[in-house]
Image (tube, rainbow, N blue to C red):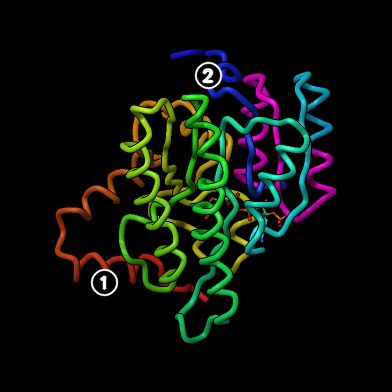
Amino acid sequence: MNNNWKERFGGAALITGASGGLGAEFARQLAAKGMNLVLVARSTDKLNALASELRQKHAIEAITIPLDLTRQDAADILRQQTQQKGIAVGLLVNNAGYGSHGTLDTLDAQNEIRMVDLNCRTPLAMTHAFLPDMLSRRRGGIIFLASVGAYQPTPYFANYSATKAYNLMLGEALWAELKPKGIDVIALSPGYTRTGFQEAGDVQSNPVGGWAAARDVVARCLAKLGKKPSTIYGFRNWFLAWSLRFTPRRLVVLLAKVISKPTV
Ligand SMILES: NC(=O)c1ccc[n+]([C@@H]2O[C@H](COP(=O)([O-])OP(=O)(O)OC[C@H]3O[C@@H](n4cnc5c(N)ncnc54)[C@H](OP(=O)(O)O)[C@@H]3O)[C@@H](O)[C@H]2O)c1
């Protein structure tokens, strides 16, 4: 496998949700591999601070595009802006996403629908926008952010875990479609990882799979890109996800209900 990431993917890495958490960590680790970056999220100041830190540290090019990715035309805007700047996107990191926690009837309907937009529609639209150029170069990569919550229905995270199942299925299927065409695809499933994500109201303090650092989760994903259709971070998370495959569905969902029950 080509260790020159710039050559391997034939262009810059575009990372959605790069202003914090796992997205910022993807930016740091890809910059350390010498990749130029396109950083996208809503928080202009955080994006600019990260871009200037990484330019100085790794002598790479990094541009920022502040954008609300729930906009229906977000993928078109990003394609246009990168084209205008002469940037080829070789690695697409579909990372931006959020969750909510609680029984569906108590959660805000518009927020849940926006979550489907950001977590599902956006990665699909972004893939449609940037895949054709990757195919014409016969190289590229796409990362989808799934979750351990993607492996079973999860009461109290019902909509969120469904959006992550979408990313897992989409990523794994595209791995098989695109591998012969020179495009590496992977769906990453982190367990609980310390980021800004928990501010969305997830109150688990001692999750079954334990806590992970964003640095380790991202390093694993980048190490497995091109080798596997998907990867679960952490042995306990992996064991949990796979043991549930052989358990009756009714029991799976009831177990998930106990594990994810709000504690306040
Ligand atoms: N942390 C975990 O435990 C965990 C576990 C499994 C899966 N994941 C997945 O990992 C991904 C990253 O999550 P994280 O933990 O890094 O969360 P985070 O720290 O909350 O970061 C989320 C990122 O998404 C961006 N974002 C949110 N809404 C956006 C919008 N409307 N338009 C553009 N950007 C938006 C945020 O930036 P702005 O606010 O600046 O827009 C931020 O950069 C998500 O897809 C999540 O589902 C996380």
Q: Which mark is residue 8?
A: 2
Q: Which mark is residue 254?
A: 1
Q: Within the displayed image, which quadrant is ligand 1 positioned in?
A: bottom right
Nearest the viewer among 206 and 137 is 137
At x 54%, y 64%, the residue is 99
Q: Is residue 139 above or below residue 3?
A: below
Indicate yes or no whether the magenta region holds residue 32: yes
Indicate yes or no whether the magenta region holds residue 33: yes
Span shown in magenta: 21-50
Query: Residue 253 location, x and y as percent?
Result: 27, 69
At x 36%, y 67%, the residue is 154
Residue type beneath disc 2: Arg
Between marks 2 and 1, how big is the CA–CA gap?
44 Å
Residue type beneath disc 1: Leu
Neighbour class for label 1 at 10 Å: few (<14), some, many (≥20)? few
Nearest the viewer among 102 and 228 is 228
Disc 2 Cβ-to-ligand 1 distance below 8 Å: no
Query: Residue 141 location, x and y as percent?
Result: 49, 32
Q: Is residue 196 above or below residue 253?
A: above
Disc 1 Cβ-to-ligand 1 distance below 8 Å: no
The residue mark sitting in front, 2 or 1, is: 2
Neighbour class for label 2 at 10 Å: few (<14), some, many (≥20)? some
Query: Residue 184 location, x and y as percent?
Result: 43, 30
Q: Is residue 37 left or right of residue 115?
A: right
At x 71%, y 45%, the residue is 80
